[in-house]
């Protein structure tokens, strides 16, 4: 069931990228595409982690659960607010906002002792998503600051 959920998330991400015309060669919007893939994986995180029935968990799982719940909550609020044509349902938060929230979760989790040596696939996936979101937030500052004059890293 977990494999089906992950496959569905990846399939949904790639169909979203193809539909929006962002899956092209050369990949000029690579970070935007990766953010969409990360968002779709985050959406299935709470479902996968809730199915495990395990209490406690690791820091990576906490990051995956937090990221997924943030996306779900922002999507539900958007639908309740009457925005049925939400085109960025996989990435409703900006890259900086998501990255800084996940950074706060990582710091708090490390400080509270949740950063164990668990090498389960759910922990590693959570860490990969978390580091991607934090890296995307900091790279957006680097690429949009100073004399480069860029308007944003992740084009929507």
Image: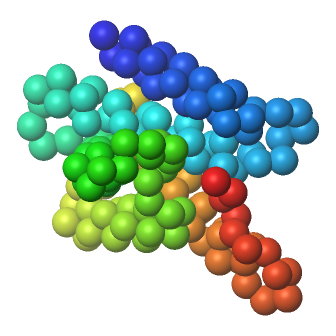
Q: Quadrant of residue 46?
A: top left
Q: Above or below — where is 87 with respect to 4?
A: below
Q: At x 25% / y 29%, what residue is drawn?
A: 47
Q: Quadrant of residue 138?
A: bottom right
Left-right relation of 32 to 133: right
Whether residue 107 is visible here, answered yes or no, is no
Left-right relation of 81 to 129: left
Residue at far right of view: 26
Which sits in the foreground, 80 or 10? 80
Horizontal and vertical percent position of residue 21: 74, 35
Q: Which scheme is used to colour this image of the protein? A: rainbow
Which sits in the foreground, 79 or 53? 79
Horizontal and vertical percent position of residue 153: 70, 64
Q: Above or below — where is 3 with respect to 30?
A: above
Q: At x 50% / y 47%, what residue is drawn?
A: 88
Q: Quadrant of the N terminus?
A: top left
Q: Quadrant of the C terminus?
A: bottom right
Whether residue 57 is visible here, answered yes or no, is yes
Which sits in the foreground, 100 or 25? 25
Q: At x 79% / y 75%, what residue is drawn?
A: 150
Left-right relation of 70 to 138: left
Q: Above or below — where is 46 with respect to 147?
A: above
Q: How many marks?
A: 0
Horizontal and vertical percent position of residue 55: 9, 37
Residue at far front of view: 82
Horizontal and vertical percent position of residue 94: 50, 63
């Amino acid at each position: 069931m977990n494999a089906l959920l992950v496959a569905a998330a990846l399939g949904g991400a790639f169909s979203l990228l193809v539909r929006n015309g962002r899956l092209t060669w050369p990949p000029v919007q690579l970070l935007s595409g990766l953010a969409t893939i990360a968002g779709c994986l985050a959406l299935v995180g709470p479902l996968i982690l809730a199915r495990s029935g395990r209490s406690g968990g690791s820091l990576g799982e906490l990051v995956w659960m937090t990221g997924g719940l943030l996306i779900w909550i922002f999507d539900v609020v958007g639908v309740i607010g009457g925005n049925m044509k939400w085109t960025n349902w996989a990435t409703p938060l900006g890259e900086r906002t998501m990255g800084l929230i996940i950074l706060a979760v990582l710091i708090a989790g490390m400080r509270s002792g949740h950063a164990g040596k668990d090498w389960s696939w759910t922990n590693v996936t959570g860490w990969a998503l978390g580091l991607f979101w934090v890296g995307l937030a900091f790279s957006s500052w680097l690429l949009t600051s100073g004399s480069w004059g860029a308007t944003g890293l992740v084009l929507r």
